[in-house]
Image (cartoon, rainbow, N blue to C red):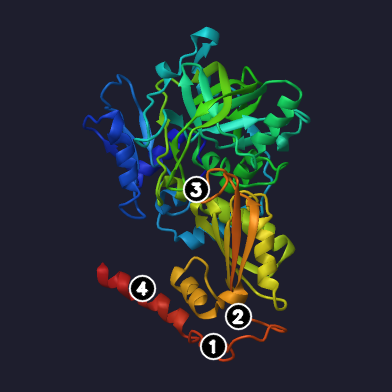
Amino acid sequence: MAYDDLRGFLSTLEKEGQLLRITEEVLPEPDLAAAANAAGRIGEGAPALWFDNVKGFTDARIALNVHGSWANHALALGLPKHTPVKEQVEEFARRWDAFPVAPERREDAPWRENTQEGDDVDLFSVLPLFRLNDGDGGFYLDKAAVVSRDPEDPGHFGKQNVGTYRLQVIGRNRLAIQPVPVHDIALHLRAAEEKGEDLPIAITLGNDPVMAIVAGMPMGYDQSEYEMAGALRGAPAPIATAPLTGFDVPWGSEVVIEGVIESRKRQIEGPFGEFTGHYSGGRRMPVVRIDRVSYRTNPVFESLYLGMPWTECDYLVGPNTCVPLLKQLRAEFPEVQAVNAMYTHGLLAVISTRKRYGGFAKAVAMRAMTTPHGLGYITTVLVVDEDVDPFDLPQVMWAMSSKVNPADDVVVLPNLSVVELAPAAQPAGLTSKMIIDATTPVHPDARGNFSTPTKDLPEAKDWAARLQRLLSEARG
């Protein structure tokens, strides 16, 4: 089932027992973020959270942890909620192959119901804002989809970027934005500022569940997130035209904010508790001037708690990081079997591959580090054999503990790029990267004693299914 807006998805979550309504009055701080934080600690079936009785707000509707479990992630893709994570990743990869699916343009978008313009813009009157972590420098919009266009080629639909970037509210009509240098919006901003021009943007809040997934996906520069959303939905993504910028935005958004990133203006932004599980400090960041806000009547404010994993952020960007890396690597190295890059948005990647010859696994790892996502994120690559499931950590740890000779199988590469948010980087934006080759050596590499490995018995797979069936029957 394809969802056209957040509300439709929330209704399904409630029917499936994956939405919990909190009816008693809560404090905006710390209760909202603390509840979302706690949801990440109660297991993989955690529900989305709904709050509409928040002290100090007369008319708040807040949704948290919407993608915050594998059950919810499965439902977002129209799969049964008990679909195992490996099967979700495999289905994600299968749907990727349908890309591109052209979007469907619609009129009468629900966010056109209400408007603020010019001096009347006041985010505080539209959104029930609250801090996510007690050390945050202010209020953040952290689950928005930000739309920008290439100033050098504004008519190219594929180069129109839809990405998720952190946005700090610094005034009733001002935001500070962090455009990470490896991301497309940073390229757009650089091109605009080289011309001395502002960069128009549209910021959409409360989007359909697949749009939230693709906005955080590492895709090619000229690949459209809307066309990828159509492939993942199995139906064209509904879009509408934003009235001020003329940009293409999701039809079903709760709120659409339009304005510009002001050329060469910077203001202190941060600190913020990041997906790395650490605070990133305050830095001078570009400033957004908001010129128009369009919003649904009684808008739902969707926010996302992030901090020490696992949080909703990790569920949201897990498969959508694994699959692009898998497809990009397999295009050049068809021997690659699977990629697990779910850990801290791919700062660590586990890759299983066959080998053509000795040293091949290290070459695959180096290529992973130079993919669009790898340039800014992958700092450690652990490579395992094709018969090791990279999503099965006991198997991965077995390979690492039994097949790695640190003198020959660990490679450290100094002074490579990484996102400034990576807490181990020194200075920010630079780090050493590491390859760990935990594969079995093949010719001409004749090291070690790996000639007689044990294998699962041929009947074990059938017995696993049989035991699961018997266990299910015994539990009723």
Q: Which residue is mark 2?
A: 440
The residue at the far front in this view is 427
In the rendered image, residue 451, in percent from the top left (x then y), is placed at 59, 91
Amino acid under label 1? Pro
Q: From the image, state whether disc 2 or disc 3 is nearer to you.
A: 3
Label 2, label 3: how far apart the Cα atoms are: 33 Å
Circle nearer the N terminus (4, 3) = 3
- At label 4, counting other C-alpha atoms closer than 10 Å, the crowd grade (few under 14, some 14-19, many 20 or more) is few
**Circle 1 sits in a helix, a strand or a loop, which is it?**
loop
Label 2, label 1: how far apart the Cα atoms are: 10 Å
Residue 216 vs residue 190: left or right? left
Circle nearer the N terminus (2, 1) = 2
Marks 2/1 in contact by CB < 8 Å: the verdict is: yes
Q: Can you say whether 406 is above or below 104 in the image?
A: below
Q: Residue at x 72, y 84 (%)?
A: 444
Q: Which residue is mark 3?
A: 423
Marks 4/1 in contact by CB < 8 Å: the verdict is: no
Q: Can you say whether 176 is above or below 74 in the image?
A: above
Along the line of sight, the residue nearer the viewer: 370 or 72? 370
Label 4, label 1: how far apart the Cα atoms are: 30 Å
Along the line of sight, the residue nearer the viewer: 354 or 7? 354
Q: Residue at x 48, y 87 (%)?
A: 457
Amino acid under label 3? Pro
Label 2, label 4: how far apart the Cα atoms are: 35 Å
In the rendered image, residue 462, in percent from the top left (x then y), is placed at 45, 80
Amino acid under label 2? Thr
- At label 1, counting other C-alpha atoms closer than 10 Å, the crowd grade (few under 14, some 14-19, many 20 or more) is few
Q: Which residue is mark 1?
A: 453
